[in-house]
Image (cartoon, grey):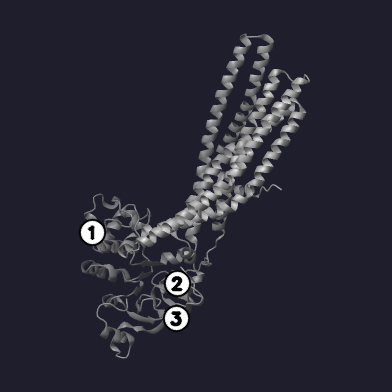
């Protein structure tokens, strides 16, 4: 039994993207109908030409028929060109919207999803899959619809000549479509495997390119090349296998098309032998029978393309069906201004059998600055991730001004908190856009004042085009210190109520660190701050200390009191560690 499910799934995915373009779709449909009518009419002109030649000889009527044939041919080509242009425009507009929606959806997914899928894999799924779908969409709309209607028109014309012609050729066409549709089924699964292999290859390639310096420095080139070739070969092998699996329908289709031409010739000869067809009509029958091969061939080709496109559709649907574990809250809003932070018996682990935080409880009053210290892997960065709701704890509650994080809107939460990390993400765009994250409501004067406040005014004055100066990918051309200070400027511009500093100063030179130290006092004024400290100097700016180890609170309290208490962990830390604390 022929299944039309792929067609319905395809159109259910893309129909909503065609709604804004109904005008173009209607114009394109009208041009397609005109082109079909002209293609059906042209063979009749040739048939009339043959009959007129046999009956009347060469005369003025033949000239007019020849001119009519040329006119119809030119009009047909013009209608086809314009309709295909419109179809391509509609297809690319629709699929670009699909790309945007996929990207927006992926950006809403939680960190667990992003840990499971590499950037290269997601790029291939968002762009590569949609690109293949775009190619199919543009060709399908022009060729599939056009040739199906053309096929129907030819069958109607043949049936008008003789019902036996229409019945015979209609049965033949039905046989071809059913056979080719049935034969394409096994290749869908093979294309699914090929698309997954492609995503894995590009995911590995993206990771390798991002880590080029580390790979070279640590002698990992042989490993990378070996896995590169293995993944590339798997991609090549699965794609070739899927492509060759579609060759059998093409081979069988050629045999069926030859059978169709023979059938048309035999039927035409039979009707001529019994006096029911003139030579021009016999020619018309043969031409229409041969022209039937064109739409059938295009239908077969599009069905073969559907194998690859259906695998893309399934992967796109699967991506849309993925839901984030971090759900938006009902919209509770803490009071404006500095916020208190409370962790109540919070337990969390990135996997169920490996807890990172264990029954963690602490309170940070509004307007205070907290320094978190502890060993690497103790859970310091995890605290900030939970505060941003990149993850939700397995148990316990996190509150801002007594409002649970889960009751707040995610946008509201992330507007109230800013994070400065050691690895600053900079974009290949202007200095202004890197500072404002593409916001247009921040004036140049405000940006200049912020840069002056953090000591970047001399650097700003050295820029050849000011705020319009382009930065290279990843901040190419900036020192680590300048990149960190730019990230610091971003926080000044967003005016959050909580600032989280993941010890950005650990990568700064002494001069730049002094500049940041001077700006910290201004930044933390009337705000709550959290500093994940790696060096003792940073703790000069904090009011309270939280010492954690292995996901548990060892000690919490006022920095001054803990430093003066010889029995405290923090005091012993100050006595035995010079410069760096636990890293």
Q: Quadrant of the C terminus?
A: bottom left
Q: Which mark identifies residue 457? A: 1
Q: Which mark identifies residue 386? A: 2
Tell me the residue at 46%/57% (across/down): 231
User: Does dot 3 land on a helix, a strand or a loop?
Assistant: strand
Quick check: marks 2 and 1 in contact, CB under 8 Å? no
Q: Is residue 271 visible?
A: yes
Q: Residues within 10 Å of mark 2 (few under 14, many from 20)?
A: some
- In the picture, residue 265 is in which quadrant? top right
Give the alpha-carbon distance from disc 1 to disc 3, as whole Å.
42 Å
Lateral position of residue 291 relative to residue 136, left or right: right
Q: Position of residue 321 (x, y in %)?
A: 57, 59
Position above or below: 276 against 493: above
Q: Position of residue 134 (x, y in %)?
A: 52, 45
Between discs 2 and 1, the one toward the N terminus: 2
Residue at label 3?
360
Lateral position of residue 170 relative to residue 316, left or right: right
**Front: mark 1 or 3:** 3
Quick check: marks 3 and 2 in contact, CB under 8 Å? no
Position above or below: 48 against 410: above
Q: Residues within 10 Å of mark 3 (few under 14, many from 20)?
A: some
User: Does dot 2 land on a helix, a strand or a loop?
Assistant: helix
- In the picture, residue 246 is in which quadrant? top right
């Amino acid at each position: 039994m022929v299944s039309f499910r792929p067609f319905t799934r395809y159109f259910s995915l893309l129909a909503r993207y065609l709604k804004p373009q109904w005008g173009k779709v209607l114009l394109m449909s009208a041009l397609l109908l005109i082109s079909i009518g002209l293609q059906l009419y042209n063979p009749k002109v040739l048939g009339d030409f043959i009959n007129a030649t046999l009956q009347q000889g060469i005369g003025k009527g033949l000239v007019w028929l020849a001119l009519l044939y040329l006119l119809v041919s030119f009009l047909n080509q013009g209608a086809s060109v314009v309709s295909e242009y419109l179809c391509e425009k509609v297809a690319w507009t629709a699929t670009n919207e699909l790309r945007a929606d996929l990207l927006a959806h992926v950006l809403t997914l939680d960190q667990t999803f992003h840990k499971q899928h590499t950037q290269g894999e997601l790029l291939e799924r968002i762009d590569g899959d949609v690109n293949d779908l775009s190619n199919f969409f543009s060709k399908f709309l022009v060729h599939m619809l056009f040739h199906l209607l053309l096929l129907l028109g030819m069958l109607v014309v043949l049936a008008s000549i003789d019902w036996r012609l229409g019945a015979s050729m209609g049965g033949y066409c039905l046989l071809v479509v059913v056979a080719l549709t049935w034969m394409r089924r096994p290749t869908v699964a093979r294309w699914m495997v090929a698309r997954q292999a492609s995503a894995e290859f590009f995911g590995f390639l993206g990771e390798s390119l991002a880590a080029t310096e580390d790979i070279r420095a640590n002698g990992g080139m042989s490993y990378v090349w070996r896995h590169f070739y293995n993944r590339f070969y798997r991609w090549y092998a699965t794609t070739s296998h899927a492509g060759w699996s579609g060759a059998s329908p093409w081979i069988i289709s050629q045999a069926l098309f030859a059978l169709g031409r023979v059938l048309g010739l035999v039927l035409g000869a039979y009707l001529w032998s019994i006096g029911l067809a003139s030579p021009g009509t016999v020619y018309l029958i043969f031409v229409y029978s041969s022209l039937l091969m064109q739409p059938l061939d295009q239908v077969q080709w599009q069905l073969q393309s559907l194998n690859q496109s259906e695998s893309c559709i399934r992967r796109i649907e699967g991506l849309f069906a993925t839901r984030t574990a971090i759900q938006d809250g009902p919209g509770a809003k803490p009071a404006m201004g500095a916020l208190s932070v409370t962790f109540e018996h919070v337990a969390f682990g990135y996997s169920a059998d490996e807890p990172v935080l264990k029954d963690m409880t602490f309170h940070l009053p509004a307007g205070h600055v907290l320094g978190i210290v502890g060993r690497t892997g103790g859970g310091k960065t995890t605290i900030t991730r939970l505060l941003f709701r990149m993850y939700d704890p397995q148990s316990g509650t996190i509150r801002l001004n007594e409002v649970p994080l889960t009751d707040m809107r995610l946008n509201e939460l992330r507007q109230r908190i800013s994070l400065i990390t050691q690895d600053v993400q900079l974009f290949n765009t202007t200095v202004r856009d890197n500072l404002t994250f593409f916001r247009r409501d921040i004036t140049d004067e405000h940006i200049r004042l912020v840069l002056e406040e953090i000591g970047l005014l001399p650097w700003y004055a050295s820029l050849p085009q000011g705020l319009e100066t382009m930065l290279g990918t990843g901040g190419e051309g900036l020192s680590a210190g300048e990149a960190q200070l730019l990230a610091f400027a971003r926080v000044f511009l967003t005016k959050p109520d909580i600032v989280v500093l993941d010890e950005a100063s650990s990568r700064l030179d002494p001069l730049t660190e002094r500049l940041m130290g001077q700006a910290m006092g201004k930044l933390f004024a009337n705000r709550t701050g959290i500093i994940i400290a790696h060096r003792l100097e940073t703790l000069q700016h904090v009011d309270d200390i939280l010492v954690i180890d292995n996901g548990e609170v060892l000690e919490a309290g006022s920095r001054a009191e803990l430093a003066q208490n010889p029995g405290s962990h923090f005091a012993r830390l100050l006595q035995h560690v010079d410069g760096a604390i636990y890293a």
